[in-house]
Amino acid sequence: MLPGTRRLLVPVLAATLVGGVLVGSSTLLGRAPQAAADQAASPTRARCALPSPQEAGSSQKYEITSGGRTRSYVLRLPDGYERRASWPLIVAFHGRGSTGVEVEGFSGLSDLPAVVAYPDGEVGTGDGYRRAWQGAPYQPTGVDDVAFTADLLDHLDDTLCVDPTRTYATGKSNGAGLTTLLACRLPGRFAAIAPVAPALYPQSQEGCEGARPTSVLEIHGVADTTIPYAGDPDRQLPAVRDWVRGWAERDGCTSSRTSRIRRDVTSTRYAGCVAGTEVAHLAVDGGGHVWPGADTYSGGGHTTQSIEASRAAWAFFTRHHLTRAEGRDR
C-alpha cells in the first residue's frame, strides 16, 4: 500500500437490486484465526480458503477507504469461483461521466472466466457533475487514482482467490487512459493492459519515460470524433498509431506486422519486445467512440459487431503473466 493511504473493506451486502448490482447495508468482513495462520504459511491457499464474499456468478457493490476517501467498486465473481483456485483478475475503468455499473453492462467482461472489478471514479473538474479519473485535464482535484488502484489491488489480492501474476487492466476513454498511467506508475502489478478508445492526454503518460516494459493492446475506432484517431493537437492528443508505435519503441520491439483480420478491422502487432512483452493495435474502420461488440449504448458513433473488445482483450491477456516475484504473492 502506498504511503498516506489506509484500507478498509466495507462490503455492501445484498439488500436491494439497483442497476443490476446488489446494494444494501455494510459490515466488516472478518477472517477466522486459523485462516490467518494458514495465510502466513501459504498465501494463495489461505486466500482461497476464505469464505466467498458473495455468490459465484453475481455482481455486488463494495467500498474501501483510500487516501482518506470512501471509494466504491463493483465486484463480479465468475461462475464456479469456489471450485477453482487462483483466478485471473481484471480491473475495468469507466469513461468520463460513466460508472462501474455502466461499463459492466456494455462491456461483456463479466462473461469472461475471471474475477472482474469495476471501480468508480470521483467527480472531476470542467463542465457537468461527472465522474472522471486521474490522467486528463478534467481529473478530480486532489484525488490519487494510482494510489487508489494500488489499495484496491492489495485488498483484492488479500481477500480473494486471485492470481497476482495474472492481473490485467482495461477501460474506455478516460478510464482507458488511466490504464496507461497505471502501467507506468505501478510496475509489476499488471501483466498487460487493453485500453479501448483511450484518452491519451499528456497527464496519462506522466512517469512513462523510462518505465518498465508492459504488454498493451490498444483498440480504437478510426471514425472516433471524441478521441480522434488522427490526434488533436489543440488538446495535445497524439495520433493513435504514433502513440502505439512509441509504446512499442519503449518496449524495445524489433518488428511489426499489419493485417486485416475482419472486413473492418486491421491488426498491427509488434514482436521481439523485451521481457516477453507484446504491443498490438486494432483499428476499426468507421468505428466511433465506443466499445466494439457492445449490444447496448457505449458511446457515440458506429459500433462494430465483427469483433468484441472483451474477447480480444481476453485473448491478449491470456498470453501474458508476471513472474511470481513481480506478482507479489504475499
Image (tube, rainbow, N blue to C red):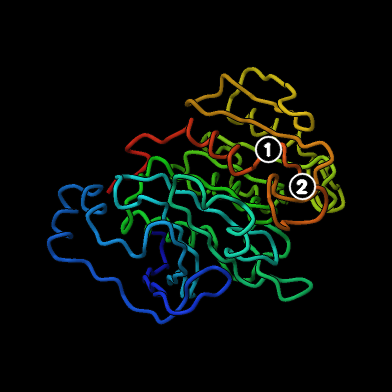
Q: In this view, does 226 lie above or below 283?
A: below
Q: Describe the element under mark 2 as helix, strand or loop.
A: loop
Numbered disc total:
2
Mark 2 Cα shell of 10 Å, populated few (<14), some (14-19), many (≥20): many
Horizontal side of 201 relative to 247 (left or right) equals right
Residue 264: % across, % down: 79, 32
Q: In which quarter of the image is the N terminus?
A: bottom left
Residue located 86% across and 47% down the image: 233
Disc number placed over residue 211 in the picture, else none: none
Location of residue 63 by image quarter:
bottom left
Mark 2: which amino acid?
Thr
Residue 113: % across, % down: 45, 44
Residue 207: % across, % down: 58, 47
Residue located 63% across and 45% down the image: 195
Mark 1: which amino acid?
Ile
For disc 1, the marked residue is 307
Residue 90: % across, % down: 49, 49
Horizontal side of 69 relative to 45 (left or right) equals right
Mark 1 Cα shell of 10 Å, populated few (<14), some (14-19), many (≥20): some
Between residues 146 and 290, which one lies in front from this camera angle?
A: 290
Q: In this view, does 21 lie above or below 110?
A: below
Q: Describe the element under mark 1 as helix, strand or loop.
A: loop
Location of residue 296 by image quarter:
bottom right
For disc 2, the marked residue is 303
Horizontal side of 180 relative to 6 (left or right) equals right
Residue located 70% across and 30% down the image: 245
